[in-house]
Image (cartoon, helix red, strand yellow):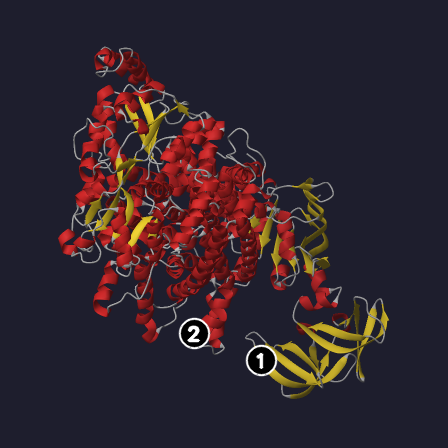
Amino acid sequence: MADLVIDNIKLRYGSVEILKGVSMTLEKGQIVALLGPSGSGKTTLLRCVAGLEEPHEGRIVIAGKTLFDGARGINLAPEERGLGLVFQSYALWPHKTVFDNVAYPLRLRGVSGSDVKTRVAKALDSIGIGHLAARFPHQLSGGQQQRVALARALVYEPPVILLDEPLSNLDAKLREEARVWLRQLISELGLSALCVTHDQVEAMAMADRILLLNGGVVEQQGTPEEMYGRPASLFAAEFMGANNRLAGKAANVTPSGAALLLGDARLEGLPCGPVRDGEDAFGVIRLERVRVADGPGPNRLRMTLTAEMYLGERYELLFTRGDASVRIFSPARIKGGDHWLEFPQDALWVCAAA
Amino acid sequence: MSKLALPFVSSLALVMTAGLAAAQVPAGYPADYAQTIDAAKKEGKVVVYGTTDAAAANFLVKDFEALYGIKVEYNDLNSTELYNRFIAEAAAGQGTADVTWSSAQDLQIKLVNDGYASAYKTPEAAKIPSWANYKDSAYGVTYEPVAIVYNKRLVPADDVPKTHADLLKLLQSKPDFYKGKVTAYDPERSGVGYLFFTQDDMAWKQAWDLFKAFGKTEIKLYTSAGAMIERTTSGEHLIGYGVFGSYALSRSKKDPNIGIVLPKDYTLIASRVAFLSNKAKNPNAGKLFLDYLLSKRGQTIIANQAELYSLRDDVEGEATVAKVKEQVGDAIRPIQINGDLAANLDTVKRLKFLKQWQAAMKGQ
Amino acid sequence: MPFALFRAAVLAIMASAVLAPIGLIVYQSFLDGPFFQPNVHFSLEAFQFVLEDDDFWEALVTSIIVAGGMTAIAVPLGVVLAFLMARTDVPGKSFLEPLILVPIFMSAVVLAFGYVVALGPVGIFSTLFKDVFGVVPWSIYSVTAITIIAGLTHVPHVYLYTSAALRNLGADLEEAARTTGASPWRVAVSVSLPMVTPAVLYAAVLIFFLGFELFGLPLVLGDPKGILVLATYLYKLTNKLGVPSYQLMAVVVVAIILIAIPLVYLQRLLLASSQKYVSVRGKAAKRSPLRLGGLRWPAFALIVLWFVVSVGIPVFGIALRSVVVTWGEGVKLAEVLTLAHYRDLVDYPNAINAIVNTILIGTVGGAISVGCYTLVALAMHRWRSGWTRVADYLVMIPRSMPGLVAGLAMLWLFLFIKPLTPLRATLVSVWVAYTVVWLAYGVRLVAGTMLQIGPELEEAGRSVGATRGRVARDVTVPLARTGMLAAWLLIFLIFVREYSTGIYLLGPGTEVIGSLMVSLWGTGAIDLVSALAVINVLIISVGLGLALRLGVRLHG
């Protein structure tokens, strides 16, 4: 059974529509990432689930319990929803110690004093900050604060945990560690989680499923592999991963194939979203799928190497041909001048330009 | 202490002093006065609203308490506050003053006429001049000459006016020297001022000449005696016209710079008027207090400690009728405590007088 | 208790506390006699009389001139002071900071009388000046003087609002302007000041409104020349007709309310536009103050000069008056020095009582009032509802009643509303009156502190399972604690100088310093008045000093 069902949620501030009918489900034990650029409504959706914003239409159900139903006028208060929420800023109460921050939800639930002690200790130990119980939030590092915030949201074992940009306040190095740790923790504890992020790498690393939001509607949803490997629109194609974009015209569009005309050259690819013959179109391809070929051939273009960047474990090379430019990854430096680049048919998406 | 305990303790005190009551009936009072005293002691306290400042009133309060063992709750209010508070409380039926005692003579008479007073003929009535007795309901308690004060440092000895006419002449002969240097109550903003000036009008045919002279010398008008006396002693003003002699007297004792003149042509006598409320919770204690104020004992304190001037001729001391007469002879003119005072409050009459006053202030 | 119920209850209690006196006054304005007397009828005569009275229009015009003038003086000066204190390296900041607020807590009557002693026609400084230059070029008994003094003494209000806004302004916004090549002064004028404009305008509207209820200054300084403003016009009105006519007073109050309503509306608009700026504010990081360079000491001198003129001179005047027998032209002060006034004060019946009551009502009463204001602020806190607009107006309305009328209305309430009658003769009634009249001020203070708490800290409480009420108790209030302490301090100081609202409720045993001063003033006992005033100033200074020593900060 789905742990969380969100059905056609709509919300506006004054005359501005923020969510225009968003639906999704979260299965038990899954992590779903709400991904999207800023202003796409992802945080608002999360806050709707938490009960901090009130939609004007739609339904939110957790484990069979209706939290919100616009039609029936049901809107449970945040505290009645029993969810765990981790804020982007962590929102640790500065006047309470770590222990008191984490113990607070238990005390609210009338847990006895000694039980509070053991459960808080267990929660803190399980995320490795048992020794910090007596400190105040301002005495902690960012990473430690994040763990306390998580412990506070987990300690009362909510059915679903909501994470709002949980990693964005950490620096780059810490963020990667925390990502792994978080993913592991959630699956170990068998939690269901809804996680807001604007970082597609984070979303793919952590989530079982990704919900891509754009302008208040769901652009596409699916597993990370589907989202990355089979985008359904130009927006989805470009939002995920690092991409090259080639401007041309579409031709020979069928359900299983489409060609991109670049002046006299022609590349075969897959159609991405609705696209018609003769229409202005973009060919989108991930950087890592373009490769240097040894000579001319189908789906190959001759381009000139104009710049190279050393990234440590590999090189990034920039090729140009007229107005078009293409970036690729290469394990080694190659000689300057012209090269043939191959754009594999199954990796090139032809999307309508509009 | 709880509310319940208080009446108990005070009634205990009453029981202990009850035996003495009969002996306390003052000389010359009817024998049945003992019953009033007993009833008053049962009431245990008397609530007084007065305009006399607490320091002066305190001499009377303490002596009365010592005499009868009845507590006095003395509320020191200004005359408008007293009026506002009294009529509202009377209407609410929540209990109000047993005795009101105010220098706003006209407002007091109005309250009597409006039916707020309880008629009571005091056993002291024979000793009280008839002008100070209004229908055996309200009584004048003091005998306060309305004085002219001046700054002894700065007013040349020859200039000090002995009469109203002197003052008029002085202002006419030295208008520049006294420009902006004379002060008085503002009849437009002060009830006392209005009362005094209308009395001047009735007492002296040249009153309006004086008022016009005030206008020409740009008199400064105030709403309180404090402001007038303070600014006269500082030299900001030189002559203060129409000030309660009682205030001037107590100030002059501390401050050698203040000189007091009781005009020899006529001196107005103001009197603080007291009456018993018909809504009194402690009517008997109220009677006792009123009688005490008018008694020789009370009046002696008024003359010698409170410095409010005693009304009775049989009292000796500094602030007494005798001393006033010593200075001005028979030129005393008590403001009659009668129905005419209430007419003073007639709006049409007031507005007419004030209009004339405004013209006078422009020197017309 | 469900939060909605709490909200409704608080709003209902507040509404009745505010509307009862106001409603009574408005009702009274349509009658032809005191509402509590038999045979009173509905009548518009009171309106007719007041509107046809030349004095009313004169007073109204003077009030508008004074209010406008003092706004024009207080606002620029307050902004400059706030900017100097919040943004520059002017010397002696920590010492100047509390001093700047002092004028708020000085009783206007005391200040005004202090000016008379110091700068009046024969004042101490005036006579010194005259000895040297031969003339006294100023007169403090004029509309101009009243306006200037009122303007100077209202600077702290502007200062409070502006400096709070400046402190909330992100340093990055200014730094951004610096990096594009603007000089510090350019940044101040073209970035910082425009950003705090809504706060400044908000304060300006407040000052303008306060101009209409000015009473103490015009009472004392307007007396000699009979200058009338709306609040002193009430006095004259009473006397004109011989007996107090409440319907006429009520009409004047209705007029002031009618002036107040559009002003509150304006404030709401300004508040909304200031929030627009809040949403774009940057990080409030530590920033280095602007260097004034050679202007450091002149800036310091400016602040000190303002303080000396608006507080130093009058307090000096009143303090001097309290230790001399007499003063003025031709008096050698050394010969008239005395401590007798203070001795007399100790002997004065109830003087000690009054001092104790004043302290009690300031400390204990002030604390309970802040508690009440906190409940109101909590009920309105982050509430998206049209009711908050109603509450905004409710909170402001009591300020429309001049103390004289407010006091009378409070007496009526405690007389004619049965459940309240037992309280009338106790200090509780005085406390209630003070609390209602200062509602607007107190609620703003507390609500402002609460708004500075990050909303997510409260949301976190909700999401882990705490009800609104629990969040208020466990998160909002503890986090607003320092702000509430500061509010307590400010309310203490205000209650210590207040009296007019309680004037009809005070009786033997419940007198306060302010009421004692007024009754002494009337009988000419200026000696005692000045001694009492000095004691009042001392209580205020000790309260302020103690609180600051204990770590109460006047703004967060």
SS for callout 2:
helix
- Residue C109, horizontal then vertical, whole percent: 34, 49
Q: Is residue B26 left or right of residue C98?
A: left
Kind of residue at badge 2: Trp
Position of residue C175 relative to residue B148, above or below, is below
Q: Depth check: give the residue in front, A9 or C430.
A: C430
Q: Which mark is drawn over residue B11? A: none
Q: Quadrant of the N terminus of chain B?
A: top left
Tag 1: residue type?
Met
Q: Would you identify the image quadrant in which residue B81 lies?
A: top left
Which residue bears the numbered disc 1?
Answer: A309
Q: Examine the rendered structure and indicate whether residue B68 appears above or below residue C142.
A: above
Q: CA distance from mark 1 to mark 2?
A: 44 Å
Can residue C229 be spotted in the picture? yes
* Chain identity of mark 2: C
The answer to which of C554 and C295 lies nearer the viewer is: C295
Disc ID at residue C185? 2
Question: Which residue is painted at 17% across and 43% down in the image?
Answer: B253
Count of marks placed on residues: 2
**Chain of the residue on which disc 1 is drawn:** A
